[in-house]
Image (tube, rainbow, N blue to C red):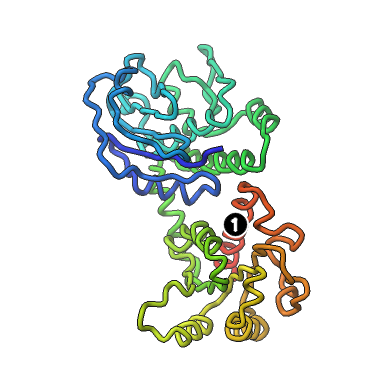
Amino acid sequence: MKNKVVLANNGVAINLHLLVDFLNSTSSFFVFEQYKDEIIIDDSVITDDTYSKLTIEADDDTNFFMIFTDKPYHNNYFFDPIGNIIIVSFYGWEYLTKLSKNNGAAYFVIDSVSLGIDSSFRHTLDDDGKPECIFDFLEDKTGIDASMRASSICPICNSRIKRSMKSAEDKVAFEDIKNILNEIGNASKWDEDLISYWSKKNKALSNQGEKKTFFISYSHADTKWLERVKVHLKPLERNSIIEIWEDTRIQTGDHWKKEIAQALDTSQAAILLVSADFLASDFIVENELPPLLEKAQSDGTKIFQIIISPCCFEETEQLSQFQAVNTPSKTLIEMDHGEQERLLFQLAKDVISHAKNG
């Protein structure tokens, strides 16, 4: 399934930049991007014709392109998409809830993504019904307040979605939905703005201890995997939980051997991207591994390993003595995309745990 969601703003009082950061920090499958160009909606009321006037072009890998606006729909809906383009209306928000529009924007994103996974069912609430599920259809828009505070998936919908899952990607996507819903619900229950709640939470995490430097050792033949690992670790680096060092930080004119030696000496943990190319590299084996392994023995430096491809990992005793995130029998390149992302997300969680607990 496609995994990119592009978000654009048409004058709504939301912090779109930080909203995108929040969504990406809480996701391992979906990728959220902010649309950089200006979105113009001339119509005072949103109709199908409004969609036909939009000049945006979504990339082929875009799941949804969502536009936030304060203008109303002709049918008074929150959103009524055409294809993968979704205009979300915040018209009259102040009469529906006292919760922030940041909370609402995140909730509508997850509502749309949930329907992208399973659009076969919507709860239609009777007069006594209380919103409690992301799959509720809110004929009474005041139900959005209770929906955001609940931010849940009811047992019936949870079972239905689990039965319909066909791939590991579906499972990872569903975990993203549940993770983001939990954060929206936690903030909304206490009448907090989602972005403020998330920022305070991250600050508390970063203040638990001095950030640790993680040295990444890899073969340049595996650069694409380095970049993917860095994507998963970026939220931790941005929030000052960790600092990452790898050799792309070396600038022209730097004494590269000296820079690497200094980085090895000051790092508190290491991430090794192990492959046949990695094990074949004389520089890695002779210059990077010895000081790392020595520090692991003398100072307790933590060694994290991802086995990229089939290689002589088990036959390399100085490495196989350390538990890898995955097993040699199922290397990264032998997994489907969803499994790869889940593994790299597990690495990020292990890194968080080590950064917090030492």
Q: Quadrant of the N terminus?
A: top right
Position of residue 200 measured from the top left corner of the image (x, y, whole percent) = 42, 54
Quarter where residue 51 is shown: top left
Amino acid type of the residue tagged 1 in the rendering: Leu
The one of 163 and 127 positioned closer to us in this rendering:
163
Going 67% across and 30% down the picture, which residue do you hit? 164
The one of 110 and 261 positioned closer to us in this rendering:
261
Left or right? Give the position of 139 relative to 216: left
Q: Is residue 75 visible?
A: yes
Going 74% across and 61% down the picture, which residue do you hit? 327
Going 51% across and 85% down the picture, which residue do you hit? 261
Q: Is residue 152 above or below residue 297?
A: above
The residue that mark 1 highlights is 344
The one of 334 and 173 positioned closer to us in this rendering:
334
Q: Is residue 209 above or below residue 174?
A: below
Quarter where residue 279 is shown: bottom right
